[in-house]
Image: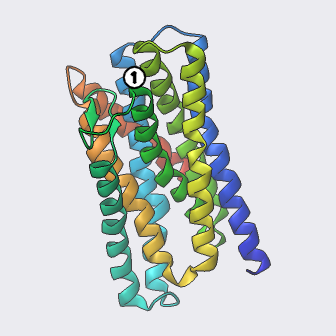
Amino acid sequence: MQIADVEVFWLGAITSFLAGLGTSIGALAVFCIRRPTARTMIGLISGAAGVMLAASFFSLLEPAFQYARSGHVLGVGTGEIGVVLGVFAGAAGLYLLHRYSPHEHFDRGREGPATTQFSRLWLFIIAITLHNFPEGMAVGVGFAGGNVPNGIALGLGIGLQNIPEGLAVAVSLLAIGYSRKVGFAVGSLTGLVEPIGGVIGAAAITLAEPAMPIILGIAAGAMLFIISDEIIPETHRGPHQDLATFALLGGIVVMMLMQSWFEG
């Protein structure tokens, strides 16, 4: 790797680690507050989904198509097709993980093979792992081409959306009988998955730059699958659908503004 590549790698790895700490910040709140109402949690998680949605388009897909159109990576036509293939590959990968890995949703309950015997604690851990890994990978590839403002904005956005996620994990475990300490520990631990994804994503862009449109597309597809298959259905169950919609729009606006400020 060249010096520039090494710097890009470490920027992606360190930023993904800092973004993962957002789950610890959110989980820490379990010691300070009573269990949030369902309305509050839906608002927070929907806002986080909005951040992820905007990040998928502005921080991942937009630079992916810029790479594809540049003509320097895989050729113009092939590069654009590569983005599309990457999106479906990322979504398909998460689909297979969800289909064959037992896990538990905050509201819909258990999914995956019914014969597998896991405690609810481990099912929660698996579910959040499925969420955080592609987020970490997205942060890692966000510095593609040495685009530091894009990577920082993406890392900050993912870190912010991790805060309500960490809180959700902690209070959900508290609700099924675990202590506040266990809730905090598990919420913090799930965030440590993001640096793993970040290292893989950062390594991918430094070692396989010709495949950059596909790599960025995979990260975006994985995040879009989570938003559509997991978060939106979860937050639109029950009486708070309007709140969920406007909170999601608020998250999109926040991420758009951060992107504009950092790149401006």
| x and y, in percent, of residue 64 in the image | 46, 72
At 49% from the left edge and 15% from the top edge, which residue is drawn? 178
Horizontal arrangement in the rendering, residue 98 relative to residue 237 (left or right): right
| Label 1 secondary element | helix
Count every numbered label the image shows and give the total: 1
Q: In front: 237, or 112? A: 112
| x and y, in percent, of residue 213 in the image | 45, 76
Q: What kind of residue is marked 1?
A: Met
The answer to which quarter of the image holds residue 206 is bottom right
- 77 shown above or below 194: below
Q: What residue is shown with label 1?
A: 41
| x and y, in percent, of residue 238 in the image | 20, 22
Which residue is at the far top?
34
| Colour basis | rainbow
**Residue 198 visible in rendering:** yes
Which residue is at the far left?
238
Q: Residues within 10 Å of mark 1 (few under 14, many from 20)?
A: some
Q: In front: 168, or 142? A: 168
At 49% from the left edge and 46% from the top edge, which residue is drawn? 132
**Residue 261 visible in rendering:** no
- The quarter in which the N terminus is drawn is bottom right
Q: In front: 183, or 36? A: 183
| x and y, in percent, of residue 264 in the image | 61, 58
At 30% from the left edge and 41% from the top edge, which residue is drawn? 230
At 41% from the left edge and 66% from the top edge, which residue is drawn? 218
- 56 shown above or below 84: above
